[in-house]
Amino acid sequence: MNLNQKKTFLISSFLLLFGVIAFLLFPFAISSVVFILYFCFTLLITLIFLIAFNKINLSDDSANTYANSNQILFSARSVFPFQLFPDRYFIQEKTLSIVRKNFFSQGWVETITIKDIGGVRLYTGPLFSSITIIRKLLPQTTVEMRNIWKKDAFKLKELLDGLIIT
């Protein structure tokens, strides 16, 4: 827990304590509904500050050393006009991550460990290429990566083949 989180907990604890004391000293002046609303508002503000401080905390050096343990070696994306919401592909030292988009901020992430990849097929066209990843696990399923620029597709296949061999 960093210093900002400790300060947030301390301030929210004092606010809650103040509300409880005010309710106990003046039970007729403060209704229980107002006390419950005050309590919920204090908890909500506390959660908002904690989430904000956690996002700031990701830029610390300790988080960066953890992130570098599986650092991104190469990233590519599908081409925009042919896919309205382009997919992103990240090759890391131990995994391949595919970020699929459905809408502006909707989508999902599919992560495949390198040791679970059985083979990689590259299909090329005049401008674009597609890559099919075959998994080792039974039943053998495939993952399609379509509408990638040719040079990016060759680099993806080259890196995936190298990581599979090692």
Image (cartoon, rainbow, N blue to C red):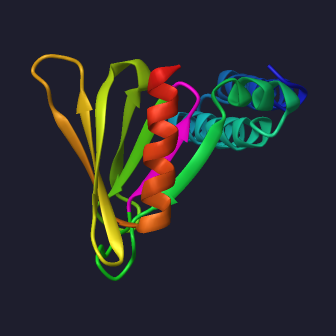
Residue lying at 51% horizontally and 45% vertically, measured from the top left: 90
Task: Using the image as rendered, state which of residue 102 and residue 156 is in the foreground.
Answer: 156
Q: Nearer the viewer, residue 57 or 78?
A: 78
Relative horizontal placement of residue 107, taking residue 42 as reference (left or right): left
Percent position (x, y) of residue 84? 31, 76
Q: State whether the magenta stretch is mostly helix, strand or loop.
A: strand
Viewed as shown, does residue 3 lie left or right of 53?
Answer: right
**Residue 91: in magenta span:** yes
The answer to if 148 sits in the magenta stretch is no
- Residue 162 image point, x, y percent: 51, 32
- Residue 164 seen in render: yes
Give the position of the N terminus as an image quadrant.
top right
Q: Residue at x 76, y 39 (%)?
A: 53
Q: Residue furthest right?
A: 3
Query: Looking at the image, is 155 positioned above or below residue 152?
Result: above
Q: Is residue 22 visible?
A: no
Question: Percent x, y for residue 64?
Answer: 78, 32
Name the foreground residue: 6 vs 159.
159
- The residue under the point 51% across, 52% down is 155
Look at the image and give the residue range highlighted in magenta.
Answer: 87-94
